[in-house]
Amino acid sequence: MKIKQVAEFLNLHPETVRVLARRGAFPNAYKTGGPSSQVRIPWSDVEEHRKKALPASM
């Protein structure tokens, strides 16, 4: 998934998702090749992060 898609799904700002990715919150995230490489985050990482971010009362 692209950063923007992840941000919309998690209801976060795209820069927040970029920071989380740099900090390792999405361990399988990767950059596409080329000079304007973009970060891609696998759906499984997004789901795992969402589960961890949910309040315990839910």
Image (spheres, rainbow, N blue to C red):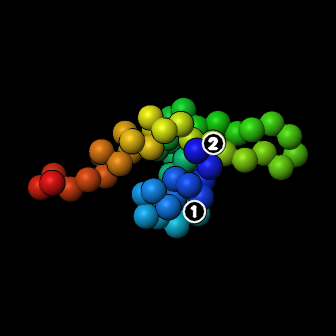
Percent position of residue 27, x then y = 50, 35
Q: CA distance from mark 1 to mark 2?
A: 12 Å
Q: Is residue 12 left or right of residue 5?
A: left
Is there a contact, CB below 8 Å, between mark 1 and mark 2? no
Label total for image = 2
Percent position of residue 19, x then y = 55, 56
Q: What is the quadrant of the N terminus in the image? A: top right
Q: Is residue 47 visible?
A: yes
Q: Is residue 1 left or right of residue 56?
A: right
Q: Is residue 58 left or right of residue 49?
A: left
* Label 2 sits on residue: 40
Tell me the residue at 15%/54% (across/down): 58
Under mark 1, the amino acid is Pro
Percent position of residue 6, x then y = 52, 53
Tell me the residue at 43%/64% (across/down): 11
Under mark 2, the amino acid is Arg
* Residue 29: quadrant of the picture: top right
* Label 1 sits on residue: 14
Percent position of residue 13, x then y = 52, 67
Circle 1: is it few (<14), some (14-19), or many (20+) Cα within 10 Å?
A: some
Q: Which secondary structure, mark 1?
A: helix
Q: Is residue 50 left or right of residue 7?
A: left
- Mark 1 vs 2, N-terminal side: 1
